[in-house]
Amino acid sequence: MATTSAKDTKTRQARKLEEADIAAFARLRILLDGFEAMAIYYFSEGSDSKEKKKRVKEIEKRVRAFQDSVKKTASLAGCPPGWCECDGTCVPPELCNIC
């Protein structure tokens, strides 16, 4: 499991949206909501369980590639504050105990 020092967590938590960031943040939320809806739709339209499992693996491969790219480009280490790594993916605190 990835760990983050208290200093790093405090630094990351201190970053807040400025008024000029609101439009970009709203656009990001729209994009992420749309991605989520499309991924679930794509999964659910699989012809059978085997096809659905294949689609999950395809989506996971693309999501992990994006995550890895962001971590390298932005020099991010570990998960966002409060989240934990579970099988290579950051999950919210309520799911940390099942990993």
Image (cartoon, rainbow, N blue to C red):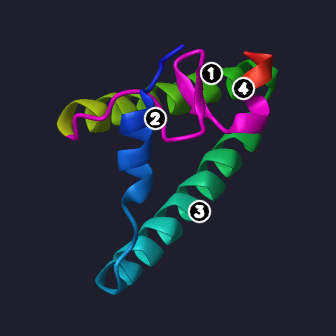
Please name whichever residue, 24 or 15, is drawn nearer the observer in this view of the structure: 15
Boundaries of the magenta span: 74-95
N-terminal label among 3 and 2: 3
- Distance from Cα at disc 1 to Cα at disc 3: 22 Å
Q: Position of residue 37 (x, y in %)?
A: 65, 57
Identify the mark at residue 63; answer none if there is no mark.
Answer: 2
Q: Position of residue 57 (x, y in %)?
A: 57, 22
Which label sits in the foreground, 4 or 2?
A: 4
Count the numbered circles shown. Answer: 4
- Distance from Cα at disc 3 to Cα at disc 2: 14 Å
N-terminal label among 4 and 1: 1
- Which residue corresponds to mark 1? 54
Please name whichever residue, 25 or 80, is drawn nearer the observer in this view of the structure: 80
Please name whichever residue, 23 or 34, is drawn nearer the observer in this view of the structure: 23
Q: Is residue 26 magenta?
A: no
Would you call the spot at circle 2 few (<14 residues within 10 Å), some (14-19), or many (20 or more)?
A: few
- Distance from Cα at disc 2 to Cα at disc 1: 14 Å
* The residue positioned farthest toward the front in the image shown: 7
Q: Are marks 2 and 1 in contact (CB under 8 Å)?
A: no
- Distance from Cα at disc 4 to Cα at disc 2: 20 Å
Vertical side of 38 occupied by 50: above or below? above
- Which residue corresponds to mark 3? 33
Instruction: Look at the numbered disc 3 and give the secondary structure of its residue.
Output: helix
